[in-house]
Amino acid sequence: MNVYVSNIVMAALSFPLIAFVITIPYMVYQYRKFGSIPWLRTLVVYSFVFYLLCAYFLVLLPLPEDRTAIVPYAQTPQLVPFNFVHEFLAETSFSPSNPSTWLATLRDPYVYEAFFNVLLLVPLGMYLRYYFRRTWWQTLIIGFLVTLSFETTQLTGLWGLYEHPYRLFDVDDLMMNTLGAMVGFWMVGPAMRVLPDFRLVNEEAREAGMRASVTKRALSFLLDLLIAGFLGMLVGFGLAAAGLSGQETISVWTDRAVLLLCFVVVPVVTHGQTLGQKLLRLRIVRSDASRAHWYQFLARYGLLYLMIWAPFAALSGVVGLDPSTSGEMGAIVNFAAHNQTLLVWAWVVLMAAWGVSLLVRAVRSWRLKRPFVMLNGLISNTRIMTVAGVERERERRCVLDVADVAALERLIADDGTPLAELMERAGTAVADTVRLHVPDPAPVVVLAGAGNNGGDGWVAARALAEQDYPVTLITSDLAERIKAEPARSTALDVFADTAERDLPLRVLIAPDADVLIDAIDGAEAVVDAILGTGFAGDEVRPPYAAWIRAANRRRFEGSRGKGRGRHRKRALERGRHERGERRSAPMRAKDAPFTVAVDVPSGLSAQTGAAARPCLAADMTVTMLAYKPGLVATETNRWTGMVTLARLVDTKPYLAALGDELEDD
Ligand SMILES: NC(=O)C1=CN([C@@H]2O[C@H](COP(=O)(O)OP(=O)(O)OC[C@H]3O[C@@H](n4cnc5c(N)ncnc54)[C@H](O)[C@@H]3O)[C@@H](O)[C@H]2O)[C@H](O)CC1
Ligand SMILES: [K+]
């Protein structure tokens, strides 16, 4: 037992070293993959590393003193399966009918070693299922390979480091370890219902990763400094080889040249990325997310260099002053030389104030979730954004009026991609968004209006049902009575498909309030495909108003559970659930379904951003082809939630054509 404990203590002592080594690569990997690093993942990953360390130490330590040591019992591999059972039965006085022998059995090395061998890989099975999302057979294979790596390391005396094996290769260990991985796999199953789902954690990390956080920028800067330091070292070797190593001025200027290369030349070549930024998917752009010019990179990093270098140069100037060599500047030099302590103190205070102001701005930007802008960024009019953030910012700045979106659709259709195909892609994009936020099949309600926005909803409903999500589609009318095209033909298609392929999609036509509320109450996701760009007016007409209210009530008040239908219905009829319409934004209920609006939240004018009564509040809006003015208007994000763009096609050429067309007008 003592050996076990001391090995774990060893692991705990060496863990900080390993953590130190892996932290920068870990951060770079996470930032590249997700854009941000949730603490939960760090906890899981580092605990996993710690666990592996413990496991390997447990099977490999203690090491023999001497490379040539022969540990007798370890020399012949034990290849008989279940040998430990035979040995145990042969050597023990265990009797099932005699309780007094039970305790002794537990203390028997054959028993507790087998038990520990199972225990050893239980955590591995847990991590594999929970964090790495492996299936049972993958866990079985990985568990076996890990234990095989233990046993072969033992058999080969740490891969030849020792001349003879110093621990026994035992088939029983292989079996017990693998069993342990499987036990862990099964054990973690029930816990996964309460543990956070990492697919959602990842999704949130991706959303948060749109921001160029201070840590991410600091890390990229650190990487750049490391790269510049390394290059500087190479240049230093070069100078030494050329016999120029002693020359102070040359090395100062070569250092500056290296900095110029890393912080100005490289960004010019890469259109705004230093190597560190490239690694972390950051980019230097102008404050409006457009491409920055070379002189802006120069200004940005030149100023930073001055801000860092100048105070130190000034300080060393003051400290190095010699009053006896005073020339023309005599009076000043004399003053500085005689008041050095005072000047150094003034310098310290100034630098401290600068440091504090940096800190305050960093904390402020963190609290207010606004980007942290440094002084040199302000002056050079440059910002560091994530590559994804730049993309989004550019999309947001390319806003199309609703009429222009219609014109764009026509251009695309004329070019051979019909509206029905666009609708197919739009609906699929919405279904993909739902699947990202509700990764396992769960009830979904699709509210589909009678226009083409509703058509997108029909496609999304089918796409989700194809992935085994039980979908309830709510429509005001029979599919054949829909007037808009291609919504009508699409809806008929989906309807026929559902019956033919027996998809889990039920269609409710103009359901009464109770049925509607029950469906929404039981949903994990709601798709709002009621009204899109075709909506006009200050009021949403029935029946859609009631649908929107039901969705908002569920969002802000949570589920009322079953059996209180009449109460809910009356409350609904009295219109008491219009919190979403009030000025102050109410809190989203904890258990509210994920609500995604198709193109624009129903009741919100895509053109003006004015919210009608009622207006649906969504967690996310997937808008088609281009941003519309209403989506970027101030104060509309309480209805839209986060807005993402589904391009559907490469719109660039069409946008250019549209621009020409508009100019001609
Ligand atoms: N941009 C694209 O690439 C694509 C967009 N698509 C989707 O189509 C809608 C626009 O469809 P449209 O048929 O023009 O209009 P809507 O469906 O938004 O609405 C028409 C529908 O609404 C009713 N209505 C209007 N005002 C009111 C009101 N005040 N109260 C109640 N009802 C109202 C009207 O009677 C009609 O029935 C766009 O948003 C996209 O989602 C396509 O998928 C193709 C690709
Ligand atoms: K909508």
Image (tube, rainbow, N blue to C red):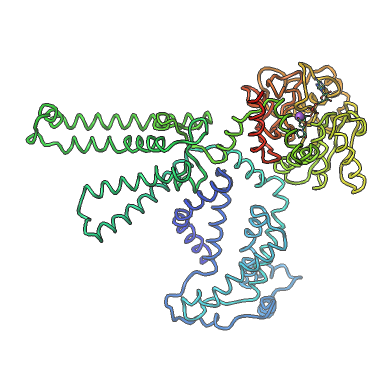
In this view, 372 is above or below 140: above
Which sits in the foreground, 578 or 538? Answer: 538
| Number of disc labels | 0
Picture quarter with the N terminus: bottom right
Residue located at (64% from left, 72% from top): 174
For residue 320, side relative to residue 612 (left or right): left
The answer to which image quadrant residue 495 occupies is top right
Task: Residue 657 in the image: state x and y as whole percent.
Answer: 66, 33
Residue located at (69% from left, 54% from top): 188
Which sits in the foreground, 68 or 237? Answer: 237
Q: Residue furthest left?
A: 324
Residue located at (48% from left, 59% from top): 9
Which sits in the foreground, 158 or 257? Answer: 257
For residue 142, side relative to residue 212 (left or right): right
Task: Residue 56 in the image: state x and y as whole percent.
Answer: 54, 65
Which sits in the foreground, 578 or 624? Answer: 624
Picture quarter with the C terminus: top right
Task: Residue 175 in the image: state x and y as whole percent.
Answer: 67, 71
Determine if residue 71 is in view. Answer: yes
Q: Residue furthest front?
A: 664
In this view, 454 is above or below 443: above
Q: Locate ligand 2 by image quadrant.
A: top right
Task: Residue 557 in the image: state x and y as whole percent.
Answer: 74, 26
The answer to which image quadrant residue 552 occupies is top right
For residue 279, side relative to residue 101 (left or right): left
Residue located at (70% from left, 43% from top): 436
